[in-house]
Structures are given as structure tokens and as C-alpha cells.
Image: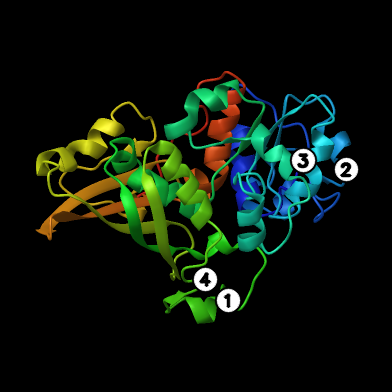
């Protein structure tokens, strides 16, 4: 693993140590060099003799079947070409290889991509859409946390061919999504009793969501997304507003999520209640609900709710899910535990 000192890295290490079919051999990092993994992740103290190492990418990958990347955006793009010189498989948690457009990457990440010719080698790692392609791939770009949550809320409508045009989204997120390094936006006294928006209508996950919905069957998807930081450590709650043809029967809209996700191991469609963050926090599970509303001017307003734990299904857990798939293992290994409640 390369880049293991952050929150996502800690969650990934924890689940790899519990994994019955893989062995975590080394963790490369720029921080805590020579120190035990518990120095960065107190919950792992004493569970392993591994220490953080400072290694060139080629050395970190030596003898490995797969390398998991927990690196920041823009850093991963510098490391991946070096890893590709070896025979190792790659699962990347950054945003550097999720998009298919170099122009969109430069616009939303603020830097020209150093190797856009590698985009085509990566499969977008949303198992609910691309499971077979992931199994056949050597290189997987795991989705972002907001993107995962929003896409899974809208995927049933896109797959049914009912999603077209404008999509308005509000996504509320916990502070761990901003990473382990403190900032003005994540400082506890400011965030604890506060709600604030950031990057309204310009978040970097927008082109990723639009590309994914288009691939799933949506027509001309245009996402207007407002993210909101909330006073919780983990979790994302996404509310998506769309309009569909009034000719689609209401009962089909009410049941489309259940039909779409009937065989999916990590997506739940709750009955008798709506999705809530505490029901999935600490787990790789997702909750989705699609609620049809009134008809106006020949269109029906539909509200889609979806929730994830941003560090697990929105990050490290989904990366392990992708690792399991590319290694030919049971997708669910080390990921089936539910979170606590409340």
C-alpha cells in the first residue's frame, strides 16, 4: 500500500489486516517513517508489526500482486506511470484517473494532467455499474465519496432510461472527507455547530458523476451540485431532485430502486423508513430511496435519497471491494460487517 497515514489509509489498513485471503506486506508513506502503524492510527496499535516505510513506487510494488494507492489527487498521477512499469495491479483512490477528459481534469483539479494517455487503461470502480469490467481489469480508479453516494442514488433511474437533463443535488458530508490535515473548514470549533457550503456548483466530482450517469443510460445529464459540510465525523447524505416523464407509472418509480439493487450485496433499500447516515456509518453499506412526487407540466418531480460512510463505501471499503474483484476473490471479503447503531 502506498499512502497509508490518512483517514482512508487507516480504514484500508484495518480491513486488510482482517482480510482472510490477502496479506498486507508493506505500507509506504511520507509521514511517520519508521514508526509503527499505530502511531498514525491508534486503533491499530499492537495489531501488526508493520511500520511505515519510505520507498520508491517500484520498490513498494516489488513482489506484490496489487498495490492500493491512498495518495492525494495530483500525487497519484506521478506515481502510477512508475508502477505500470512493473507487473502489479493498481487500485487508485485519488481522482487522477477517474475522468476520461483531460480538459475536465484540468478545469476541476486545477492542473494539467501529466499522463492523460493512461485514462483509457483504468476502469471506473463502481461495482454496481462496472463489476465485470473491473474483474477483467488490471487498473481501477475508485470513485470519490460524493460521487459514489450521488451515483448510487440516481443509478436506478439512469439504467431505466428515465434520467434526462438537469439534476439538482445537495450533499451533506462529515469532516473526515476533508482528510487528516486540519484546515479552517475542518477545525472543530468552527465546524461543530455549523453548516456551511463550499465549492457550490464547482465541485470536482461533478464531471465524474455526469460521465458515470451517461454511461449508465442517462441522457444529457447536467448536475448542479451544492456540497455542505456538517458537524459529524463520518457520513454523506445526498438529496437529488430530478424530473421524469409523467407517463412513467408511479408504482414503477417506487419500486425501481428495489429492482435495480435486488442482488447487490452492499446496497439496501429500506422499507418503512428513509435512508439515514447512522444506519451505514462504520460500514460498506449504502441506503437508497426514490420517492415520486407531484406531476407538473407533464413531468413528475422525483427525489432520490442516498447515504454512505465516506471513508468506507465512499473510499477505502470500495477500494477493497475493487481489489477483491480484480484478484478474483469474493467481493464481500472483509466488508460485510455492519456499523454500530446509534
Q: Mark 1: give few (<14), some (14-19) or many (20+) Cα within 10 Å.
A: few
Q: Closer to the observer: label 1 or label 3?
A: 3
Using the image as rendered, state which of residue 240 and residue 189 is in the foreground.
240
> Are circles 3 and 4 on residues that touch, CB within 8 Å?
no
Mark 3, residue position = 80
- The residue under the point 85% across, 28% down is 62
In terms of sequence position, does the residue under pointer 3 or pointer 4 come before the other?
A: 3
Q: Position of residue 281 (x, y in %)?
A: 42, 51
> Are circles 1 and 2 on residues that touch, CB within 8 Å?
no
Note whether 341 is above or below 122 in the view shown. below
Quadrant containing the N terminus is: top right
Residue 302 visible (yes or no)? yes
> Can you tell which mark lies on residue 55?
2
Note whether 262 is above or below 43 in the view shown. above
Where, by quadrant of the figure, is residue 249 drawn?
top left
Mark 1, residue position = 187
Q: Closer to the observer: label 4 or label 1?
A: 4
In the picture, measured across the screen, residue 292 lies left or right of residue 2, that is: left
In terms of sequence position, does the residue under pointer 4 or pointer 1 come before the other?
A: 1
Q: Closer to the observer: label 4 or label 2?
A: 4
In terms of sequence position, does the residue under pointer 3 or pointer 2 come before the other?
A: 2
Tell me how far mark 1 sits from mark 2, CA to CA. 32 Å
- The residue under the point 35% across, 41% down is 155
Amino acid at each position: 500500500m502506498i499512502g497509508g497515514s490518512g483517514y482512508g489509509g487507516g480504514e484500508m489498513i484495518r480491513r486488510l489486516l482482517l482480510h482472510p485471503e490477502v496479506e498486507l506486506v508493506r505500507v509506504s508513506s511520507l509521514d511517520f517513517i519508521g514508526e509503527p502503524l499505530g502511531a498514525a492510527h491508534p486503533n491499530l496499535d499492537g495489531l501488526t508489526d508493520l511500520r511505515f516505510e519510505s520507498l520508491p513506487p517500484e520498490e513498494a510494488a516489488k513482489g506484490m500482486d496489487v498495490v492500493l494507492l491512498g495518495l492525494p489527487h495530483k500525487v497519484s498521477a506521478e506515481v502510477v506511470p512508475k508502477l505500470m512499469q512493473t507487473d502489479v495491479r493498481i487500485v487508485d483512490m485519488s481522482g487522477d484517473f477517474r475522468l476520461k477528459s483531460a480538459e475536465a481534469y484540468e478545469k476541476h483539479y486545477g492542473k494539467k494532467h501529466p499522463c492523460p494517455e493512461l485514462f483509457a487503461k483504468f476502469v471506473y470502480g463502481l461495482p454496481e455499474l462496472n463489476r465485470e469490467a473491473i474483474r477483467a481489469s488490471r487498473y481501477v480508479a475508485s470513485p470519490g465519496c460524493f460521487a459514489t453516494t450521488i451515483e448510487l442514488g440516481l443509478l436506478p433511474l439512469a439504467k431505466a432510461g428515465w434520467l434526462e437533463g438537469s439534476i439538482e443535488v445537495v450533499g451533506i458530508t462529515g469532516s473526515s472527507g476533508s482528510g487528516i490535515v486540519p484546515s479552517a473548514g475542518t477545525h472543530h470549533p468552527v465546524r461543530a455547530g455549523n453548516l456551511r457550503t463550499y465549492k457550490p456548483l464547482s465541485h470536482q466530482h461533478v464531471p465524474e458523476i455526469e460521465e458515470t450517469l451517461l454511461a449508465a443510460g442517462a441522457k444529457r445529464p447536467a448536475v448542479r451540485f451544492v456540497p455542505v459540510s456538517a458537524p459529524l465525523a463520518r457520513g454523506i447524505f445526498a438529496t437529488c431532485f430530478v424530473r421524469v416523464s409523467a407517463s412513467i407509472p408511479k408504482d414503477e418509480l417506487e419500486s425501481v430502486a428495489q429492482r435495480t439493487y435486488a442482488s447487490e450485496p452492499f446496497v439496501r433499500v429500506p422499507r418503512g423508513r428513509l435512508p439515514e447516515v447512522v444506519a451505514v456509518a462504520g460500514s460498506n453499506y449504502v441506503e437508497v430511496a426514490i420517492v415520486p412526487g407531484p406531476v407538473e407540466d407533464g413531468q413528475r418531480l422525483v427525489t432520490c435519497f442516498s447515504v454512505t460512510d465516506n471513508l468506507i463505501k465512499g473510499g477505502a471499503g470500495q477500494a477493497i471491494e475493487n481489489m477483491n474483484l480484480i484478484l478474483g476473490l469474493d467481493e464481500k471479503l472483509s466488508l460485510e460487517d455492519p456499523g454500530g447503531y446509534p
